[in-house]
């Protein structure tokens, strides 16, 4: 009985040690400063649907993307385009640009969801050296397409997930 208790304590301690190591690894911020450019829509892409003004959708996406960059520890600080960066942080400053490159309205149900494709580009701010380009595709409910609040939250969360996965 005593051996089983000791073994349980050892395994439990080992599990805590491994979990603490994994948590410490996740706390490191990928970039010190990120300049986030406003999101755009590629020419010829009809988004959002039903003749809705895209400005509110893009603003919601920008707002939630900014928050998620910091929450998900991709950026310690997010600045607006042209924002000042200290000399100490300039070497680690990057720019992120995002563009909606395609939108397929499809059906208005989960059997035939709407599909949004984006292009997200990261490059060094100092010399514009490309770091990463991803083209994620997002299937979404109709309500997500037409309501800017849901759109901003869902697409930002999904985009950050895809970005974080690509940066590993």
Image: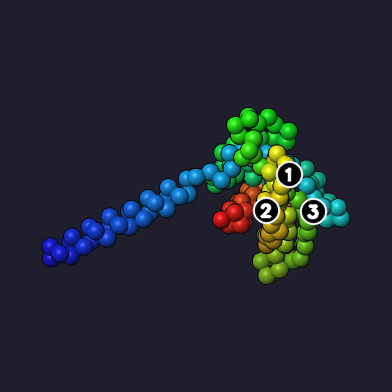
Q: Position of residue 16 (x, y in %)?
A: 32, 53
Q: Position of residue 160 (x, y in %)?
A: 61, 51
Q: Evaluate whether residue 57 shows in this view.
A: no
Residue occupied by mark 3: 47
Q: How is the image coloured?
A: rainbow
Q: Kindly check if marks 1 and 3 are in contact, taking CB atoms under 8 A apart as contact.
A: no
Residue 108 numbered mark, or none: none
Mark 1, Cα crowd under 10 Å, few <14 / some 14-19 / many 20+, is few
Kindly report the distance in space between the C-alpha atoms of the residues bearing marks 1 and 3. Answer: 29 Å
Name the residue furthest right: 44
**How far apart, in angstroms, are the residues tagged by discs 2 and 3?**
25 Å
Q: Which residue is mark 2?
A: 132
Per the image, label 1 sits on a secondary structure element best described as: loop
Q: Earlier in the sequence, mark 1 or mark 3?
A: 3
Q: Residue at x 68, y 48 (%)?
A: 122
The mark that comes first in sequence, 2 or 3, is: 3
Q: CA distance from mark 1 to mark 2?
A: 12 Å
Comparing labels 1 and 2, the label whose residue is closer to the camera: 1
What residue appears at the point 64 percent right and 35 percent down from the top-left corner? 90
User: Number of numbered discs present?
Assistant: 3
Q: Which residue is mark 1?
A: 128
Q: Is residue 91 above or below residue 47?
A: above
Quadrant showing the N terminus: bottom left
Task: Assign a secondary structure to mark 3.
Answer: loop
**Picture coordinates of residue 95 (x, y %)?**
69, 43
The foreground one among 39 and 113 is: 39
- Please name which of the two marks, 1 or 3, marks the residue nearer to the observer: 1
């Amino acid at each position: 009985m005593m051996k089983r208790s000791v073994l349980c304590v050892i395994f439990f301690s080992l599990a805590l040690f491994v979990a603490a190591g994994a948590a410490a690894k996740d706390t490191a911020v990928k970039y010190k400063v990120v300049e986030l450019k406003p999101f755009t829509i590629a020419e010829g892409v009809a988004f959002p649907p039903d003749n809705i003004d895209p400005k509110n959708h893009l603003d919601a996406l920008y707002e939630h993307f900014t928050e998620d960059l910091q929450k998900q520890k991709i950026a310690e600080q997010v600045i607006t385009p042209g924002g000042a960066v200290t000399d100490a942080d300039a070497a680690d400053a990057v720019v992120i640009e995002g563009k909606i490159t395609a939108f397929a309205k499809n059906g208005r149900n989960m059997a035939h969801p709407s599909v949004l494709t984006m292009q997200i580009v990261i490059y060094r701010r100092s010399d514009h050296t490309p770091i990463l380009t991803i083209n994620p595709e997002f299937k979404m409910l109709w309500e997500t397409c037409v309501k800017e609040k849901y759109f901003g939250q869902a697409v930002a969360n999904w985009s950050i997930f895809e970005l974080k996965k690509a940066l590993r």
